[in-house]
Image: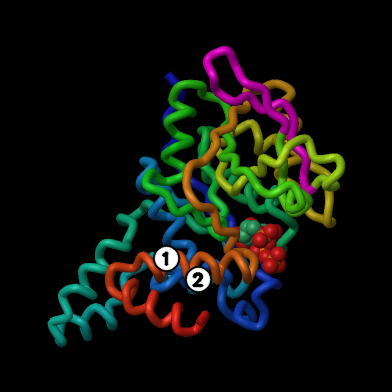
Amino acid sequence: MAYPVKTAVFPVAGLGTRFLPATKAMPKEMLTVVDKPLIQYAVEEAKEAGIEHFIFITGRNKNMIEDHFDRQYELMNILKEKNKLAQISILENDLPSAGQTSFTRQQQPLGLGHAVWCARHLIAKEPFALLLPDMMVKSKVGALKQMIEQYNGSGGNVVGLYEVPHEEVDQYGVVKTDVRPDGTIKIIDMVEKPKISEAPSNLMIMGRYILQPEIMMLLETQNIGAGGEIQLTDAMLKLLEFQNFSGVNITGELFDCGSKLGFLTANLSYALDHPEVGEAFRKAAKKLIS
Ligand code: UTP
């Protein structure tokens, strides 16, 4: 039986330069898809997968994220005075319980690998989930929950995979895979942002991982990699030399909300399905497009 995954790490210390000026003073992870910030979708996905401890790697200008997961007494009191029960229940439901969140800082955005390493003292030598909040999956069963099901059988490390058009592989971490006798996917190689002609497949690592704690020791000695950053993929490649890695083809619709196009498409998709505004929005969108 695999050691249960109860902790999730959310790296939220990036600069979000693709969204400037929106992200000048506001964290990218607080951008909203309809009425919820990206980071909240990620936390809800983790909760659904059984996560009990939420670790945020924050940086400058990211205090808003900590506040978002705290009680807002003044707002609550005003809502109570106005008897706005629906809004009160939205705020109550969004809150993790006391002690379930931890925040640490990555003082300089030195890359995803470095951000993950900043959580080393908080993960208590246990396997942990890693969720990049700007990668959103719209699905019946959350992406991380789909991966936990695989992890419970195989143990080891697990990455979420998603097929992308071949001409886009140079934007992502891409894997080479094999199929095990039981039909599950074994990862045999990973390449960060390969040249299109050299990519081993069009399966990208889509921002969800379950990692064993030994990754921290490898990140500790990791040199600067592609883009002048400490790359998580480089450390995972070293881990692959002595630990098992599985892949899970994620079922659902993936939106790369770190890019303007992906973010706008996510908003369109969630708005069309929104119980309150969906129907009216569909009419408004049709009018705009025609
Ligand atoms: P991105 O690669 O999207 O980088 O990070 P970014 O800085 O946020 O955005 P751009 O490219 O400048 O527009 C993916 C995730 O990893 C986090 C980000 O906050 C985001 O959630 N990250 C990235 C860190 O926490 N630290 C880093 O040094 C880099």
Q: Tag 2's secondary structure?
A: helix
How packed is label 1: few (under 14 Cα within 10 Å), some, or many (20 or more)?
A: some
- Report how far apart the C-alphas of labels 2 and 1 lie in the structure: 16 Å
Residue 278, image quadrant: bottom left
Residue drawn at x 55%, y 36% is 249
Which residue is at the far top? Answer: 181
Place of residue 60 in the rendered image (x, y in percent of width and height, measured from the top left): 62, 71
Mark positioned earlier in the residue sequence (2 or 1): 2
- In this view, the residue in front, 279 or 232, is 279
Q: Residue 9: which numbered mark, if any? A: none
Residue 13 appears in the figure: no
- In this view, the residue in front, 220 or 140, is 140
Residue drawn at x 86%, y 43% is 197
Residue indicated by mark 2? 30
Residue drawn at x 42%, y 62% is 40
How packed is label 2: few (under 14 Cα within 10 Å), some, or many (20 or more)?
A: many
Of helix, strand and loop, which mostly describes the magenta segment?
strand
Whether pointer 2 and pointer 1 mark residues with C-beta atoms closer than 8 Å, the reply is: no
User: Disc 2 residue type?
Assistant: Met
Q: Tag 1's secondary structure?
A: helix
Say whether residue 38 is left or right of residue 97.
right
Q: Residue 270: which numbered mark, if any? A: 1
Asked if the magenta segment contains residue 227, the reply would be: no
User: Disc 1 residue type?
Assistant: Tyr
**For the magenta stretch, what is the residue range?**
176-193
Residue drawn at x 37%, y 47% is 140
Q: Is residue 46 above or below residue 94?
A: above
Viewer-side label of 2, 1:
1
Place of residue 285 in the rendered image (x, y in percent of width and height, measured from the top left): 45, 79
Place of residue 265 in the rendered image (x, y in percent of width and height, measured from the top left): 54, 67
Which residue is at the far front? Answer: 290
